[in-house]
Image: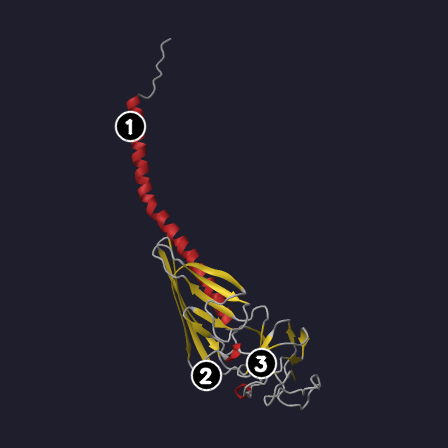
């Protein structure tokens, strides 16, 4: 029996391959732009998320800053975060007798080592410090534990306390205020610095935004701080500008302009943070 089955010739096969290649090339051309655009959008979204999270962290920290503790050296922004606060007794009327040996009130006329609170009890931990009457706009007094500063190490018992025991060094006269407030600085945090470092780059940013903490209290700002701990908040930073303006004795304004550059894609974020400088 004679078979009528026939197959593709070589020429027909080559033609099919050529046509398929042409169609594939055209498809790639049409799909490349949307795919590239999707990748760029995803990259910018990730960069924005990183920068936004970093700025939000800075904002949360700075809103707890001890009044007049913010100071700036280049792109190094330092402050003292508070974990609690209260009011000290300014007279002995109604005192509980918790500091009987030294008097229940806080004295500004001589060195004092103990005072009662008129506010609810505060939970203290080892290494905590207190700041009283931080009114100096230069930002240095809250870092000093001498007679010219307003920082004192807490030396009392840990846990909930209604009295404050401190190193007996006389406070300066300007620290005595009608508000009778004091702030508590955590011993695990101490001073904190946010810093933009090694900023630059043309295709990818070379800079980083870092947080430093637990390095102690420096009477003169050190940039970068030494000791303690540090953490990376954002990288690929190509530009960073931080300013601090004391609007008046009550308020200060921090502005942060951050640019992240990655794979030629650039995003720019700007944030304003208001800080309260009323002790």
Q: Residues within 10 Å of mark 2 (few under 14, many from 20)?
A: some
Q: Nearer the viewer, residue 275 or 42?
A: 275
For marks 1 and 3, give the one nearer the viewer.
Answer: 3
Q: Nearer the viewer, residue 183 or 227?
A: 227
**Quadrant of the rendered image containing residue 238:** bottom left
For marks 1 and 2, give the one nearer the viewer.
Answer: 2
Give residue 263's position: percent from left, percent from top: 37, 53
Q: Residues within 10 Å of mark 3 (few under 14, many from 20)?
A: many
Residue tagged 3? 182
Residue tagged 1? 15
Residue lying farthest top?
1
Left or right: where 90 falls relative to 16: right
Q: Nearer the viewer, residue 97 or 110?
A: 110
Label 3 with label 2: CB-CB less than 8 Å: no
Precedes in sequence: disc 1 or disc 2: 1
Give residue 190's position: percent from left, percent from top: 55, 71
Q: From the viewer's perspective, is residue 242 above or below residue 151?
A: above
Which part of the image, by quadrant, shows the N terminus?
top left
Precedes in sequence: disc 3 or disc 2: 3
Separation (CA) of disc 1 from disc 2: 83 Å
Separation (CA) of disc 3 from disc 2: 18 Å
Q: From the viewer's perspective, is residue 106 above or below residue 52?
A: below
Identify the secondary structure beneath mark 1: helix
Give residue 113's position: percent from left, percent from top: 64, 83
**Count of marks, rendered view:** 3
Identify the secondary structure beneath mark 3: strand
Q: Kindly identify the residue that appears in the image at 44 percent across and 69 percent down.
A: 76
Precedes in sequence: disc 1 or disc 3: 1
The image's colour scheme reads: secondary structure
Q: Kindly identify the residue that appears in the image at 32 percent across and 29 percent down.
A: 17
Residue tagged 2? 249
């Amino acid at each position: 029996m004679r078979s009528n089955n026939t197959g593709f010739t070589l020429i027909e096969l080559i033609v099919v391959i050529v046509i398929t290649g042409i169609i594939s090339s055209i498809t790639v051309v049409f799909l490349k732009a949307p795919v590239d655009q999707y990748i760029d959008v995803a990259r910018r979204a990730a960069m924005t998320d990183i920068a936004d999270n970093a700025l939000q962290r800075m904002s949360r920290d700075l809103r707890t800053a001890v009044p007049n503790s913010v100071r700036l050296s280049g792109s190094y922004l330092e402050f003292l975060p508070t974990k609690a606060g209260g009011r000290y007794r300014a007279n002995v009327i109604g005192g509980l007798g918790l500091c009987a040996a030294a008097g229940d009130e806080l004295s500004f006329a001589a060195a004092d080592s103990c005072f009662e609170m008129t506010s609810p009890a505060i939970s203290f931990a080892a290494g905590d410090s207190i700041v009283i009457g931080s009114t100096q706009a230069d930002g240095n007094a809250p870092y000093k534990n001498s007679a010219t500063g307003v920082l004192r190490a807490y030396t009392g018992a840990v846990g909930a306390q209604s009295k404050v025991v401190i190193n007996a060094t006389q406070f300066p006269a300007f620290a005595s205020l009608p508000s009778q407030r004091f702030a508590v600085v955590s011993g695990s945090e101490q001073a904190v610095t946010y810093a933009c470092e090694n900023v630059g780059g043309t295709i990818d940013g070379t800079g980083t935004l870092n947080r430093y903490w637990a390095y102690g209290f420096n009477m003169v700002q050190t940039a970068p701080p030494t000791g303690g701990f540090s953490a990376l908040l954002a990288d690929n930073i190509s530009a960073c500008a931080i300013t601090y303006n004391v609007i008046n004795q009550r308020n200060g304004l921090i502005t942060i302009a951050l640019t992240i550059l990655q794979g030629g894609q650039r995003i720019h974020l700007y944030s304003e943070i208001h800080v309260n400088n009323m002790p």
